[in-house]
Image (cartoon, grey):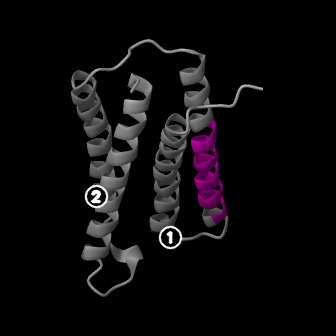
Amino acid sequence: MTMLEKRAWVYLLVTVVIYGGYVVVILGRRGGGPLTEVDYVPVLLWSLGISIGASIVVGIVAGMIGDHSTRTDVRDREIDQLGDRIGQAFTVIGALGAFVLALVEAPYFWIANAIYLGFALSMIIGSLAKVVAYRRGGFQQW
């Protein structure tokens, strides 16, 4: 397993766990009231910070464990680029969703969460695309 594949696994797992935790905390704070009344800003900022820190720490630990290649070849770069392009599409979708929500003057809660969901989906789907490409052997040679 190359370092790029390990990094894809780390980003996938960390993002799923942290974003899932964010959703659970926000829904738990709801208390029967509307979601727009939840004090989401501190939870959102903490989850972003924890996500960045956890990705760094888990990435370092994963890099120290096992046998892996630190060299990248054309296949690794193509897989990395493919996953990044797929992931970036979800960042754009999240931004467009937030844009539309701002145009209809939706509460800030929904705008911020549309952006955060776009970021999370970008990392999850992009990393998943990389993992699938690695597991299926990369690209066909034409």
Amino acid type indicated by mark 1: Pro
Q: Say which residue appears at 39% left-offset and 27% top-offset.
A: 1
Quadrant assignment, res 9: top left
Residue 18: percent from left, percent from top: 31, 53
Task: Please provide the residue range marked out in magenta.
Answer: 85-100
Residue identifier under label 1: 107
Residue 27: percent from left, percent from top: 31, 74
Q: What mark, if any, has residue 43 been given in the picture?
A: 2
Q: Residues within 10 Å of mark 1 (few under 14, many from 20)?
A: few
Is the residue 90 above or below the residue 81 in the image?
Answer: below
The Cα–Cα distance between marks 1 and 2, rounded to whole angstroms, is 17 Å
Quadrant assignment, res 141: top right
Q: Is residue 35 left or right of residue 74?
A: left
Q: Nearer the viewer, residue 106 or 138?
A: 138
Which SS does the magenta portion mostly show?
Answer: helix
Is the residue 39 above or below the residue 89 in the image?
Answer: below
Q: Is residue 79 left or right of residue 55?
A: right
